[in-house]
Image (tube, helix red, strand yellow):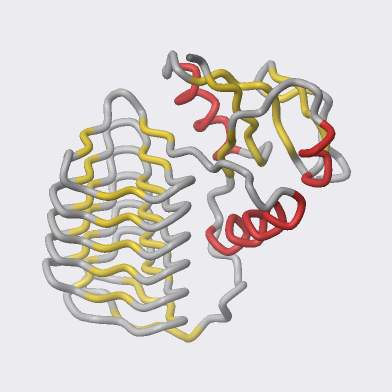
């Protein structure tokens, strides 16, 4: 049975999500939801159905959806807003056909694994996580809710990434490292030691640069 999905967001990340869903025969894009006052009537060929408050008024049957927003804190706020309008809304997991997913991992609702992504044995991905294009998560890692790894980013085994944290494009996190909540590891970094909450770190090896606010954008 083909399920009708709505996609939240009309930015660059949403373009990639649309492409993935078009490769999945069991899903169909019903339309887009976007809260921008300047939103277009169509996006990537699909109708923009309205803002978040429009969920309940969509005429066609909606089987679920995915939040296609790359910025972690914004994705979290949108998820909270959706639940206000529809507490029972079904967030689906989207996995590109070329991704490798271990049968022994756990992936939370609303999470996305993009083309060439790897999620290995005994990994736990929380809700609304992103494993971006060619990113890999080695055995026994844990990623908290609303966390993300960027394109070409690799986590060694037994790495912990806290909720709402982002490991940016091309970074490498060595085996056994723990990264706290709301922390950003910069592009190309090599992470050899633990970092706590609400930190920006980058370099090779990665070093503390400054503290950051929870809601501070990183994209």
Residue 87 left/right relative to 194: right
116 w.r.t. 24: above or below? below
107 w.r.t. 10: above or below? below
Counting every numbered tag in the picture gives 0
Q: Which quadrant would the C terminus be assigned to in this image?
A: bottom right
Near-viewer residue (28 or 12): 28
Q: In the figure, residue 118 lies in which quadrant?
A: top left
Farthest-out residue, right? 37
**Residue at screen point 32% across, 62% down:** 143
Q: In the figure, residue 139 lies in which quadrant?
A: bottom left
Farthest-out residue, front? 88
**Residue at screen point 27% across, 57% down:** 124
**Residue at screen point 71% across, 48% down:** 86
**Residue at screen point 66% across, 40% down:** 8
Residue 126 left/right relative to 32: left
52 w.r.t. 5: above or below? below
Residue 49 picture location, percent across and down:
80, 29
Residue 173 picture location, percent across and down:
21, 64
Residue 70 left/right relative to 88: left
Residue 17 picture location, percent across and down:
51, 32
Residue 149 picture location, percent across and down:
36, 54
């Amino acid at each position: 049975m083909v399920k009708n999905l709505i996609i939240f967001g009309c930015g660059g990340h949403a373009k990639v999500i649309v492409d993935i869903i078009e490769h999945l025969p069991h899903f169909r894009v019903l339309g887009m939801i976007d809260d921008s006052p300047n939103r277009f009537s169509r996006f990537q060929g699909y109708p923009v159905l309205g803002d978040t408050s429009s969920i309940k008024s969509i005429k066609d049957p909606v089987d679920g959806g995915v939040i296609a927003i790359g910025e972690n804190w914004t994705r979290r706020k949108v998820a909270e807003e959706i639940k206000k309008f529809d507490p029972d809304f079904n967030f689906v997991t989207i996995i590109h056909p070329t991704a490798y997913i271990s049968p022994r991992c756990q992936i939370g609702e609303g999470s996305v694994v993009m083309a060439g992504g790897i999620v290995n044995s005994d990994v736990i991905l929380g809700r609304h996580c992103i494993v971006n294009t060619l990113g890999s998560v080695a055995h026994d890692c844990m990623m908290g809710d609303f966390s993300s790894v960027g394109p070409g980013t690799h986590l060694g085994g037994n790495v912990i990434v806290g909720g709402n944290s982002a490991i940016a494009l091309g970074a490498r996190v060595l085996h056994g490292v723990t990264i706290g909540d709301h922390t950003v590891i910069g592009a190309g970094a090599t992470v050899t030691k633990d970092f706590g909450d609400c930190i920006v770190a980058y370099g090779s090896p990665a070093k503390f640069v400054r503290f950051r606010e929870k809601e501070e954008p990183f994209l």
